[in-house]
Image: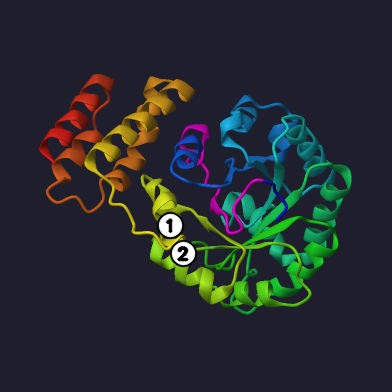
Amino acid sequence: MFLNNIPSFPLILSPMEAVTNHTFRMICKKWGCDIVITEFIASDALIRNIEQSTRKMLFKEEERPLGIQIFGSDEKTLVSAALVAQERNPDFIDINWGCPVKKVAQKGAGSGILNDIPKMISLTSAVVKHTKLPITVKTRLGYSENNKPIVEIAKQLQDVGISALSIHGRTKQQCYKGNADWTLIGQVKNDPYIKIPIFGNGDISSPQMALEYKNRYNVDGILIGRAAIGNPFIFKQTKQLLNNEEISPITMEQRVETCKEHLDGLISFCGEKRGILEMRKNYGGYFRNIPDFKSYRIRLVTLNDYDQIINTLNEVLERF
């Protein structure tokens, strides 16, 4: 494995814009996540020292191993951004060749570069050559249903020196629609030419699914993304299943206390007003499948006063 002191089959928090901030990464680490990665950072903003981007690189030692993820489409800018990230001393730098969002992809960054594989390889090679840290890549199967050259891409990325590859089982054009196809991820992993770790990503929604896909596709680790939003407990429960242990149910006290911790962390990091707003996307996950919870969820996603939110969470604990 390219990192020390991690399990042979690591569980990785998939980087997500406006989700995998410092606070959420710390919580996921607490609940068993092995590797975390920052939100993706635009290379041009990073070299221009834009505060919003540089703040994304902030992390604590407890988060290690941690990678800083960057994206861009210009060699000089991407290399310069990698060097800026390297100064923060993360454990590795991850290049995002997978984001399908239009404003990113239409500039030839993220998964937009899957229309120009030679450039993708060239840019990746330049970052590897100019940095000292391990360089990893996160990408997709290809640009479209009729253009999924991920097996060949993986070989070329390995040849230019990346240390690990994470593959999302969709194409650029799919965005997040349809089902992730892990078949090609398995082909990459099981190709005898491939020596670097191959991590699978896409649609892992439960510990049972993580175990099934580990066994079926023989990947070296799994990324968990949307299923972890408001549900950091999935990492602990997945580890229990991987270790042939009984999965521990999450108590209401654990849900409420972790929810409070998340809210307090967001407020500490980005201020009370924004922290309260950012937290709203998480309540549904923390209290998913709780009967008769709708009225409390509506209150939590509409309240703007911190004390009222805490009182509501305390009421939830008493009620359920």
In the image, taking residue 305 as reference, residue 77 lies left or right, namely right
Secondary structure at badge 1 equals: helix
State the CA–CA distance, disc 2 to disc 1.
7 Å
What residue is rendered at 38% in x and 47% in y? 233
- Residue at position x 76%, y 64% from top? 116
In the picture shown, does residue 227 fall above or below 81? below
For the point 28% across and 51% down, which residue is it?
249
Amino acid type of disc 1?
Thr
39 above or below 192?
A: above
Q: Locate residue 270, reporting x and y percent.
A: 47, 24
Residue at the right extreme of this rendering: 129
Q: Quadrant of residue 93?
A: top right
Give the left or right position of residue 237, taking residue 187 as reference: left
Residue 299 is inside the magenta segment: no
Visible in this render: residue 315? yes
Residues in magenta, as a range: 5-24
Instruction: Give residue 247's position: percent from left, percent from top.
Output: 34, 57
Disc number for residue 210? 2
**Which residue shows up at 73% across the image and 29% down it?**
48
Proximity of marks 2 and 1: CB atoms separated by less than 8 Å: yes
